[in-house]
Image (cartoon, rainbow, N blue to C red):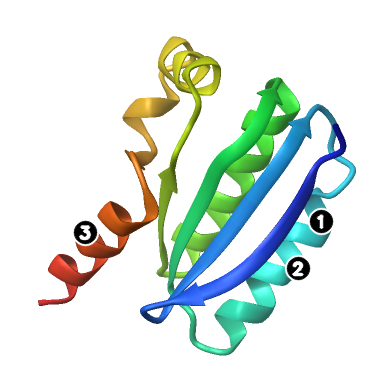
Amino acid sequence: MNFTFDFDIESSIGIISLSGDILSKDKDEELIEHVKQRMDKGQLKFILNIGSVEYINSSGLNLMLKVFTYIRNRGGELVITQPNKMVADLLKISKLDTIFNITADNQTAIKQFNELSK
């Protein structure tokens, strides 16, 4: 299944939804450009919803790190939501679960962001 992404906004938080198999670097620059455009407009809080990612390899992990680093280096925050068991296991094995803030769903991530804003 081809890798795709979509943007949405909920509670002033940018939601980036990834789907398919992330097996190459084909869309890295396109995704970073979309994030850049959102940040240029003042968006600083993002959710990376990977609930529809079926398979991910090192290129996919690299993409997630690029997005995370880009956002953090510009003063933003990123929460990853809904990893399936295979992706969650991969994040744990690679110890990326110690770097990323990972939640079960978007609502939990939104709640975390709102609590930080208080």
Residue type at the position of mark 1: Glu
Mark 2 residue crowding within 10 angstroms, few (<14) / some (14–19) / many (20+)? few
- Vertical order, 60 against 65 (above or below): above
Give the x, y percent position of residue 45: 41, 69
- Residue in the image at 45% along x and 22% along y: 88
Q: Is residue 34 left or right of residue 48?
A: right
Q: Which mark is residue 33?
A: 2
Q: Which quadrant would residue 57 be assigned to in this image?
A: top right
SS of the residue under disc 2: helix
Q: Of callouts 3 and 1, which one flags the residue occurring earlier in the amino acid sequence?
A: 1
Q: Quadrant of the N terminus?
A: top right
**Which residue in the structure is indicated by mark 3?**
112
- Vertical order, 20 against 54 (above or below): below
- Residue in the image at 37% along x and 34% along y: 99
**Which residue in the structure is indicated by mark 1?**
29
Mark 2 touches mark 1? (CB < 8 Å) = yes
